[in-house]
Image (tube, rainbow, N blue to C red):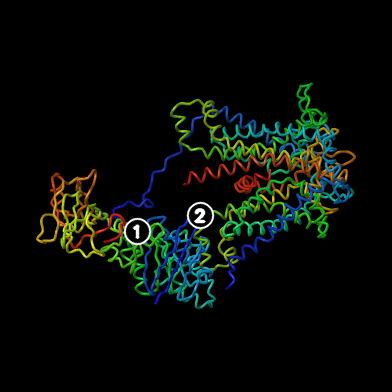
Amino acid sequence: MQVRWSKWSPRIALIPAVVITAVAFVGAICWTIYISFTRSRRFPEYEIDFSEWGRQYERLFNDGAWETSLQNLLVLGIGSALAIVLGFILAAMIEREKRGEGFFRTIFLYPLAVSLIVTGIVWRWLFNPDLGIENFLQQLGFENASFNWLAAPDTAMYGIILASIWHGSGFYMALMLAGLKGINTEIWSAAKLDGVSFWRFYIEIVIPMMKFTFLTCAILLSLGVVKAYDIIVAMTNGGPGSSTWMPAFFTINAYAGRSNIAYASAAAVIMLLITAAIFIPLVLVTAWQTRRREAQQV
Amino acid sequence: MTEIVASNPEVREFKSYPPKPRKLTGSSIAILVFLTMCAAFVAIPLYVIIVTSLKDMAQIRFGDIFSLPEVWTLEPWRVAWDEVCSGVTCEGVKIGFFNSIMILIPSLILSIGLSAVTGYALALWNVKWAGTFLFILFTAAFVPFQIIMIPLIIMSGIIKVYGTVWGVAIVHAVLAMPLLTLIFRNYYKDIPSEIMNAAIMDSGSFWKIFGEIILPMSGNIMIVVLILQITSIWNDFLIGLTFGGIGTKPMTVILANSVITSRGEVTYNVDMAAALLTAIPPLLIYFVLGKFFVQGITAGAIKG
Amino acid sequence: MPCVEFRNIAKQYGRVTVLDELDLTVEDGEFLVLLGPSGCGKTTLLNLLAGLIETTAGTITIDGRDVTEADPKDRGLAMVFQSYALYPTKTVRGNLRFGLSSQKLDKAEVDRRVAWAAKLLQIEPLLDRKPGQLSGGQRQRVAIGRALVKNVGVFLFDEPLSNLDAKLRTEMRLEIKRLHNELHQTIVYVTHDQIEAMTMATRIAVMDGGVIQQIGTPDEIYETPANLFVAQFIGAPAMNMLKGTLKVAGDRVTAQLDEVGAELDLSGHAFASAPENGAPIVAGLRPEHFSVGQTAESEATSFALPVRYTEKTGGDATAFLNTKSDNGLLAVRVDPALVAALESGGDLAVSFPASRINLFDARSGQRM
């Protein structure tokens, strides 16, 4: 029987992708999980001491810096959720007013093209106590104005939140705008004819219709927060003390700073678990939406 | 003879009317004021970084970050480009600029080439396990970098690319592969199946169909993916930091080193100039190809 | 000589069986139309022949060669698709050339064939345009051209005219028929449009539920439908179906048709098997076989029924009569000149010649 190349060439073409996935993703994740149960330090050791296989995790949850990291994860997550709210308000106003849509969209979105390192450096400059905004406000006559957030452990995270909102709200605006434009125009016309008030229309009709856009935004935001690293390095480098550590920062530090592979792996495994907890709802939502779309098409 | 009677819309001329001016109502004004304030909040950092980079240190030390330069100077830009110190070397951010380009080009070719072919095979050819593989790719696109970082470092050491531009480029390509494959696959999936069937009957060759039919149809998605990749590789910090060696680190890492860990008197104008130099390539792309940029970041949304 | 042969074909998608134990032979030079409602399996059958989907069981041979496992490009086929499936980034010339890419031909031969097909289809001025710049009819011609250049023995058409407007459809119907007459190649043509089937086919295979219900020339299919499905599917307005019961008394066979209140004399009917007394039957009467008023023909059945409404379509007119069952309608082709008189209501007396009756067994649906 002749060889059917049409059957084999796509499979051959897929080999690189399959190998990469198997080695660099599946294999690498398994390796990291395995190593997190060992006593590896600078170099990987493959022996597991079963009497204390969970020692890295035990250490991790007794580590103050890790506790701070997890707290900050929550703080940054809740704080930068403001970017979603702001994004929605901006999108709703742009969509309603239409005038200057292109201009405002261009302005609101440009921070996304700026790397988080540059973002952090710029905001560090704005937060500079002697020469930045604080100085500017005091010169204006607000003697008590304090904008030196990054210097104090209890306000440093707020500085990072502010910079994150600056960087991200345009992105959520773009997603919201796409969602708003997806709403049937007849609904807007119907509401206008019915004389529904502005606020009631948005709260009772638009927001419920956009619940999946909101959910997507929330999930994307959470995933971004788990990965937050660059902005921390650029703004505070974890300081003051370890007050602005985040899990991603902690993991890199355990590897590059403390040269402890097993410890870094354990922290990375927890990061993976957090990601999975966020990721699984996304999968369910996507599957649900796909099914709904298909059902509509039939 | 209905054709003769029927009016031809192309021939018929319509009167042109002047556009009706829209009324500016109270709520419109309120909205525009609010939007302008928000736009100012978003735009101010860019303004501050630009004016700071054009001032001399004497004026900066005086405070007032919002004021325009009294003496306009490009000196900070020159210093940032040519002289600024990163670690022990003091050759400016230009080293990083060239490194970033050296990283960018091979990783663009690798990641886009690999992902386009993979997406094409998964979308248009009958591969039984395509669904399973796509799900794995979807999952892989979300995995935090840290969980695969250490094994990747060890592996790149084994194939002797650790610390080279090639190492950074390959890691970028590997990490981008799942997401880009999904983007290409979703685009190719919408190519009508009859076109694919016709091509299978006409040629039947996997590569010939890709090269002659599918690739010429991918113009739009190629631009979107190209912009997405250029921006994300150029703006990357972590991969460059962990995989770049001495003298092969990308621009963001050089910038961070020179600004964050610099000693002695801080020259804010040089810092801002260096930051601007780093930010200019993606900003340029954004302002020139904004439409594709938005599509790109929306498609790449899951990258976070 | 059989050109295409399907033997014992089965196609299943998971647990769903689309085709089962299907046999079909297409003779050389034949224009075979696969006709049936959507979902009847006709497109599946065509795609199996093209090799675009794989058979679950059975064999397909083309020109005596078993191609069941062969690649689509190696089967010696060309196909015209419903949406034309032109390559949008290639010019018309590029589209035609790409059709030849699996055959290793020298450049001169490729150019010669492209020129030949372009001339045949009158698309020469369009050769350097892209598909996006063509009208629907022009695209259709290019799609046919792309198939023609391949110079193969069998052409497949998958509802190629369904995206065209009525006028163009008539034109292209003639065009395809002309090409078949000139080139004498074997054509397998899928459609759900009976007009296309009746006007173009040398043979029609009527399909329903994955089964070939009847295969024959257009006249055979029309005049002597093999079963109730074919009888009702072919013809517009559809054949009138009247239920009745057979009465056998010696040589005399009759059927009482309660719906029209008439008795049918079937003594002269050529039954496939001996008629059985009391058997339920369905009598099929084509609207155009009625004649208005009494006829001289002695074997005709006559009855009169009230007119419900009339429909005039240009040169033709149809009167719909109320039958005696609830909401039953009987379609009768009438002279358009009569319509005005019929609109006032009242009964219309019609008669039907016995020789034109299609008789079906009500239990099996098969022709008697």
- Looking at the picture, tell me which residue is in the foreground, C125 or C12: C12
Quadrant housing the C terminus of chain C: bottom left
| Viewer-nearest of discs 2 and 1 | 2
Chain at tag 1: C
| Badge 2 amino acid | Arg
- According to the picture, the residue beneath numbered tag 2 turns out to be C15
* Residue C58: % across, % down: 48, 67
Number of disc labels: 2
Residue A106: tell me if it is visible: yes
Answer left or right for A80 relative to C296.
Answer: right
- Looking at the picture, tell me which residue is in the foreground, C137 or C327: C327
Position above or below: A14 against A195: below
| Badge 1 amino acid | Asp
User: Going 82% across and 60% down the picture, which residue do you hit?
Assistant: B160
- Looking at the picture, tell me which residue is in the foreground, C221 or B7: C221
Answer left or right for A149 relative to C363.
Answer: right
- For label 1, the crowd category at 10 Å Cα-Cα, with few meaning under 14, some 14 to 19 and many 20 or more, is some
* Residue B236: % across, % down: 75, 47
Position above or below: C98 against A267: below
- For label 2, the crowd category at 10 Å Cα-Cα, with few meaning under 14, some 14 to 19 and many 20 or more, is few
Mark on residue C193? 1
Mark 2: secondary structure = loop
Mark on residue C209? none
Position above or below: C125 against A165: below
Mark 1: secondary structure = loop
